[in-house]
Image (cartoon, rainbow, N blue to C red):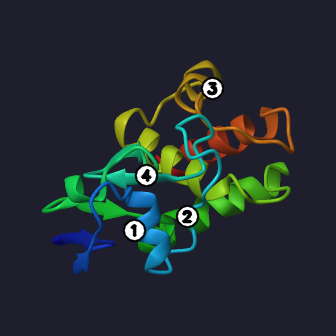
Amino acid sequence: MKIKFMLNDRSQTWHTEPGESLLDLLRRHHVVSVKKGCDGSTCGVCTVLMNQKPVLACTVLAVRCAGEHIHTVEGLADEVEKISEAFGIEGADQCGFCNPGIALALYALKAEHPEADAAEIKQYLEGHLCRCSGYQSQVKAALRYLGEAS
C-alpha cells in the first residue's frame, strides 16, 4: 500500500507493508536518526514527532501516517543544534544513542511548556532510557536549552 505524508516538511509517497511500523518504514528509507532499541515502547530511542507531538515510532503503524506530518532530528537541524550544544556543555552526550529521541522530546516540551522546571522535565522524559548516565546531566542540559530558547 502507498501512503503519502510529510517527512521533515517534504512530501513523501512510500510503499508500506501491512503491519509495518513507522520505525521500520523510516529505517528502510535510511532515516538513521530514528533508532531501533527495544521494539516494545519502553526505551524512547525511536521517538519522532507526529503533528508536533512525540510518539514512539515502534508502536505507530506506518499506515496511520498517511496525511500526517512527521519530524525527525534531520528536519529540525537548527533546534537540534541548540539542544546538542546544551548536551555538550552539561556532559549529557556520552554514547549518543538516546540523544535523538530525547532531543525531539525536549523540542516538544519547549513548545508545550517552555518554563518547565527540573521535576517537570524528568516527568516529560520519563520513557527515555539512557544507559550511560544518571539523567542529571540531561536535566541540566534541558534546563539550559529551555532557558536559552525562551
- The label number, if any, that marks residue 80 in the structure image: 2
| In front of the other: 17 or 4 | 17
Q: Helix or strand or loop: what does disc 1 sit on?
A: helix
Q: Does label 3 or label 1 sit earlier along the sequence?
A: 1
| In front of the other: 84 or 37 | 37
From the viewer's perspective, is residue 14 above or below residue 20? below
| In front of the other: 63 or 8 | 63
Q: Does label 4 or label 1 sit earlier along the sequence?
A: 1
Residue kind at label 4, given as amino acid type: Ala
- The label number, if any, that marks residue 57 in the structure image: 4
The image position of residue 144, as x and y in percent, is 66, 45
User: Does 105 sit left or right of 86 as displayed?
Assistant: left
User: Does 150 sit left or right of 42 as displayed?
Assistant: left
Q: Does label 3 or label 2 sit earlier along the sequence?
A: 2
Residue kind at label 1, given as amino acid type: Leu
Q: Nearer the viewer, mark 4 or mark 3?
A: 4
Asked whether residue 11 appears in the rendered view, the answer is: no
Cα separation, mark 4 vs mark 3, equals 21 Å
Which residue, given by chain and number where applicable, does mark 1 sit on? 25
Label 1 environment density (alpha carbons within 10 Å; few <14, some 14–19, many ≥20): many
Label 3 environment density (alpha carbons within 10 Å; few <14, some 14–19, many ≥20): some
From the viewer's perspective, is residue 142 above or below residue 7? above
Residue kind at label 3, given as amino acid type: Lys
- The residue at 52%/45% (across/down) is 106
- The label number, if any, that marks residue 122 in the structure image: 3
Asked whether residue 38 appears in the rendered view, the answer is: yes
From the viewer's perspective, is residue 97 above or below residue 110? below
